[in-house]
Image: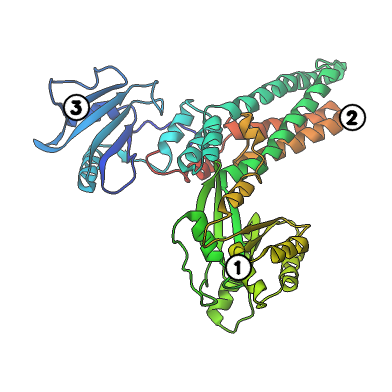
């Protein structure tokens, strides 16, 4: 797969299905010539092989005197195209029939269906972008919030790549001197200044650690924050979900046990995606289906980064439940999931007096507590504001490099561990040939990030996750 292909590929670049227009993309050395065979210009006879790059032409796609569609054809000549090859994009009407007629026409004439991500793979192989930038293309397409969009865009523009390449280049320069020393081992000469090398290793170690630590934020920005809404049946969990989403997503009923499966949906708060999970109410039940739902509730707590425990103030007021019992249930959650961020929400604040509110505040004084009415939608803004403050977006605001890709995170960790071994070797004054192995390892892992070091399996795994047409 590291060999640059020389055939011409085709794919639908817009989503499949009916739309106003569709874009069909071809890439390869013969793409312009092949399209030219079936394109007839609307106003003047044009040869697409002779037109300027980055120009658009109106005409018809014709097969055996049959007009398939009136189209706009965009021509991008190598090397100034997305893939670095000759690229043609055909803008046709969005009929599925027309799309397939055009695609099949070119397939019958020697063009091949593109594999997932093959256009971007060719861009990488032709040096139009490095591997981390290529992966950022997929992240940009799938971005679902302002923050995830910003991180993907920064990476696609090469901010992360340039930082990694700068580290790798500095380390490579010293590695070359170390390797040179090994060639003259018998003559006991030093080409690499040990003091300068020690400073460089310390600097690289510090930068790698900062990038590794940024993954905690990057992962949140990319994938969103999973939030489990839990509590007893009929306390307003589904009503709260509907209030947050501003739509009737979950069924609301006075009948206990209505929610029997987890209901999920996502909203963006201050540029961060939050995935809210409405779960089955926790109680003892003989209902088999409801029991399965409650089991799933505890599974969702495991998966969640934030847990909202909701209770009903009206039930406390009329004695159906007590603050003590609520406290007991919350303590069980804390004991079982001590690392989870827990937020306690008292629902139906509109039906209680100030004395009961004071008692609740006193009971949960050491915990994060909010009052709201999910039905009346009062206090929802305070909740979303509190959620927004949970994420420290300082690095994002300062336009710092943020790692959001788990493959990069793993490679950075491996490189960091190798650099730490180099540091240990320098401190212990061990033989140069021993810590030279760790230097090579660090260079290898840094090279994996940008694609200086690749394997067919690595590229296959990365680009298989792309959509066809990109």
Furthest-right residue in this view: 428
* Residue 143, percent from left and from top: 49, 42
Q: Residue at x 76, y 18 (%)?
A: 177
Q: Earlier in the sequence, mark 2 or mark 1?
A: 1
308, above or below 32, in the image? below
Residue 448 appears in which quarter of the rendering? top right
Tags 1 and 3 in contact by the CB under 8 Å rule?
no
Other residues around mark 2 within 10 Å, as few (<14) / some (14–19) / many (≥20): few
Which one is in front, 211 or 462? Answer: 211
In which quadrant will I find the C terminus?
A: top left
- Label drawn at residue 427: 2
Q: Earlier in the sequence, mark 1 or mark 3?
A: 3
Which one is in front, 229 or 422? Answer: 229
- Label drawn at residue 60: none
Which one is in front, 273 or 427? Answer: 273
Secondary structure beneath dot 3 equals strand
* Residue 440, percent from left and from top: 72, 30
408, above or below 304, in the image? above
Question: Which residue is denoted by mark 1 in the rendering?
Answer: 297
| Residue 441 is at least partly visible in this image | no
Q: Nearer the viewer, mark 2 or mark 1?
A: 1
| Residue 321 is at least partly visible in this image | yes
Secondary structure beneath dot 1 equals helix
Secondary structure beneath dot 2 equals helix
67, above or below 330, in the image? above
Residue 282 appears in which quarter of the rendering? bottom right
- Judge from the rendering whether residue 394 lies leftward or rightward of residue 38; answer left or right: right
Question: Which residue is denoted by mark 3 in the rendering?
Answer: 58
The answer for how far apart the CA atoms under marks 2 and 3 are is 69 Å
Q: Residue at x 20, y 33 (%)?
A: 71
The answer for how far apart the CA atoms under marks 2 and 1 are is 51 Å
Colour scheme of this structure image? rainbow
């Amino acid at each position: 797969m590291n060999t640059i292909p020389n055939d011409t590929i085709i794919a639908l670049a817009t989503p499949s299905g009916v739309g106003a227009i569709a874009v069909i993309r071809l890439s390869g050395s013969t793409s312009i010539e092949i399209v030219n065979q079936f394109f007839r210009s609307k106003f003047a006879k044009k040869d697409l092989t002779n037109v300027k790059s980055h120009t658009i032409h109106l005409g018809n796609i014709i097969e055996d005197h049959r007009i398939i569609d009136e189209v706009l054809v965009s021509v991008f000549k190598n090397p100034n195209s997305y893939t670095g090859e000759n690229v043609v994009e055909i803008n046709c009407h969005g009929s599925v029939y027309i799309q397939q007629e055009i695609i099949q026409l070119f397939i019958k004439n020697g063009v091949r269906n593109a594999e997932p991500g093959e256009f971007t793979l060719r861009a990488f192989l032709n040096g139009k972008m490095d591997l981390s930038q290529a992966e950022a293309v997929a992240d940009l397409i799938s971005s679902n919030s302002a923050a995830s969009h910003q991180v993907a865009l920064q990476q696609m523009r090469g901010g992360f790549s340039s930082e990694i390449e700068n580290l790798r280049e500095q380390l490579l320069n010293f590695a070359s001197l170390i390797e040179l020393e090994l060639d003259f081992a018998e003559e006991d000469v030093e080409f690499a200044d040990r003091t300068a090398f020690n400073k460089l290793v310390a600097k690289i170690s510090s930068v790698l650690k900062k990038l590794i630590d940024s993954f905690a934020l990057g992962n949140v920005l990319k994938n969103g924050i999973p939030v489990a809404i839990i509590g007893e049946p009929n306390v307003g969990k589904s009503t709260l979900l509907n209030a947050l989403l501003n739509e009737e997503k979950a069924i609301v009923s006075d009948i206990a046990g209505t929610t029997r499966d987890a209901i999920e949906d996502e909203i963006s708060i201050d540029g961060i995606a939050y995935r809210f999970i409405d779960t089955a109410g926790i109680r003892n039940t003989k209902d088999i289906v409801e029991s399965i739902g409650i089991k799933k509730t505890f599974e969702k707590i495991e998966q969640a980064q934030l847990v909202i425990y909701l209770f009903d103030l009206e039930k406390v007021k009329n004695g159906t439940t007590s603050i003590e019992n609520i406290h007991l249930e919350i303590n069980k959650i804390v004991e079982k999931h001590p690392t989870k961020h827990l937020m306690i929400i008292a629902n139906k604040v509109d039906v209680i007096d100030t004395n009961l509110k004071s008692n609740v505040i006193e009971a949960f004084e050491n915990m994060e507590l909010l009052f709201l009415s999910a039905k009346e939608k009062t206090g929802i803004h305070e909740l979303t504001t509190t959620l927004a403050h949970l994420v420290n977006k300082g690095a994002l605001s300062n336009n710092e490099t943020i790692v959001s890709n788990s493959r990069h995170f793993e490679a950075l960790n491996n490189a960091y561990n190798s650099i730490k071994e180099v540091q240990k070797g320098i401190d212990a004054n061990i033989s140069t040939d021993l810590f030279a192995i760790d230097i090579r390892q660090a260079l290898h892992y840094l090279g994996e990030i940008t694609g200086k070091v690749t394997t067919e399996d690595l590229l296959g795994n990365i680009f298989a996750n792309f959509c066809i047409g990109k």
